[in-house]
Every structure is written in structure tokens, then in C-alpha cells.
Image (cartoon, grey):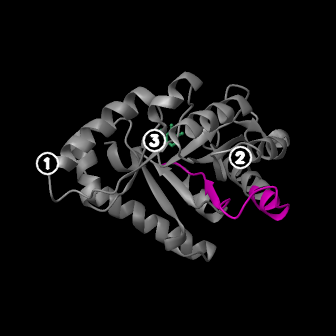
Amino acid sequence: MVKISERLKQVSQSIGEACSRAGRAPSDIRMVVVTKSAAIDSILEVMKLGALDLGENRVQQFKKVSGLVAEHIAQDESLPKNINWHMIGHLQRNKVRSVLSAIHLIHSVDTLRLAEEISSAAKKQNISPSILLQVNTSNEPQKYGVPIGAATHLAEQIMTLPNLKLCGLMTMAPLTKDKDAIRSCFTRANELFVEMKGERIVGPEFKELSMGMSSDYEIAIEEGATILRIGSAIFAG
Ligand SMILES: *Cc1c(COP(=O)(O)O)cnc(C)c1O
């Protein structure tokens, strides 16, 4: 079994190599370590190795794992204290209120109703959470995410809501071995990202492009990702 430290090193190295190919600086790319299937000891280990951005895709699991992590932080001086939690999966409106203040960035906003719910809960809590608009670049009907053609209009509507910071876009490539299909999703997301910035629909905080998972993060880097979401490449095996 390969150790987690080795896996983390391998991923960092591949990120570095993809950055070189793309003429980008590794410091411009943030990795969210996706903890959803990992054991708590493994999570604590990646934290000790410097991973401060952690992600979960389900509210229930987020509450459980972030609670455990917080307990360990309170007891163990060697753990970093400044963890940023990312909500990367579909968020139900009735779950928003209870997790909002604990989340650094919500990657998965894809409807006006969800954005409105986050905005009104945030207003009551007197906070301004950061969100990304999830776009469906693969045209798979079962996928979450606003269709590309509707994304700009939704962003305009979201920009009118109080207590929200729209910080960029998120997308998922289809589960396929077809690298060209994956790349074209990421290219489309990047084109939309650049176009939205150019049209100034959005504000100066609109600068994140969250795309790339264990199987496709190198392509995502080449296509302009600023945030990667990586789980199994670090924890599985
Ligand atoms: C699970 C998950 C990831 C990480 O996937 P891996 O293939 O394990 O790296 C990234 N993004 C989302 C939305 C996920 O649910």
C-alpha cells in the first residue's frame, strides 16, 4: 500500500508538471482535498502535510467529518487550525441554513432558488458566503449544473441578491476515458468564465474556475482551472 504522503507528493508533482506544460504557476492553483470516503486518520494526516482546503459533497457527511476534525484540532497542537471547508456536491435548500457559516466556498449553486435561499439565510446570519455557479458542460441530462446557455442570465440574477459573493464557476467532466470529451468540457467552462469576466456582469471577486478531479486534473490545469477537487488519487488504494 502506497502511503498517503507518497500519493500527495505524486499529485503535487503531476500538478507541477501540468503547470509547466501550460505555462502556469503552481501557486495559482489550489487543491481541495475531497475527504468523502476517507478515514479520519488519513484526513488528519493530509492536514499535517499541509492540506488546508477540504471538501465534502454531502451535508450529512460534512457535518460528521468537520465535527470530528474540529475535535481533533482542539486536542492536537500539531494540527493546523485554519481549515477551509468546501461544499462541492448538490446542496438541498432545506440544508443551507445549518451549514452556511461553516463553509468557506459553496461550489455547487445551480439554480436561482438555491442562490436565494443562501442569500436570505446569509442575511439573517449577517455573513456573505462565497459561491460558485455550477455549469453543466457535458450536456448529460442527469448532471447537476445550469446549462451553458443559461449561465450568464443566472449569474446576472444572482448578482442582484444581497449577502452573496459570486466567485466563479465550477464544472464536472463526464465519466469517460475519452480525453477529448473531457477537455472540451473544460475548454467550454473556461470560455464561459473568460466571457463572463469580460462582460463585467460579475465583480472583481469572480476569479475561480473549479474543475478537475483525480482522473482529469491535469487536463483541467491545461484548460485554466484555479481550483482542483481531488479525492481518490490521495486516499484510495
Ligand atoms: C467526489 C468528488 C470529487 C473528487 O473525486 P475523485 O475522483 O475522488 O478525485 C470532486 N468533485 C466532486 C463534486 C465530487 O463529488
Q: How many marks?
A: 3
Badge 3 residue CB within 8 Å of ligand 1: no
Secondary structure beneath dot 1 equals helix
Say whether residue 100 is left or right of residue 139. left
Residue at the extreme top of the image, as rendered: 94
What residue sits right under mark 3 in the picture?
101
- The quarter of the picture where the C terminus appears is top left
CB of mark 2 within 8 Å of CB of mark 3? no
Between the C-alphas of marks 2 and 1, the distance is: 46 Å
Q: Say whether disc 2 or disc 1 marks the residue closer to the N-terminus.
A: 1
Q: Amino acid at mark 3?
A: Ser
Tag shown at residue 75: 1
Q: In the rendering, at what x and y percent does residue 210 appear? A: 59, 52
Between the C-alphas of marks 3 and 1, the distance is: 22 Å
Q: Amino acid at mark 2?
A: Ala
- Taking 88 as reference, is 26 above or below it? below
Question: Over which residues does the magenta segment extend?
Answer: 193-214
Q: In the rendering, at what x and y percent does residue 127 appear? A: 53, 46
CB of mark 3 within 8 Å of CB of mark 1? no
What residue sits right under mark 2 in the picture?
181
Taking depth in this image into account, of 125 and 208 the one nearest to the observer is: 125
Q: In the rendering, at what x and y percent does residue 135 appear? A: 71, 42
Mark 2 or mark 1, which is nearer to you? 1
Q: In the rendering, at what x and y percent does residue 187 appear? A: 74, 56
Q: Is residue 144 visible?
A: no
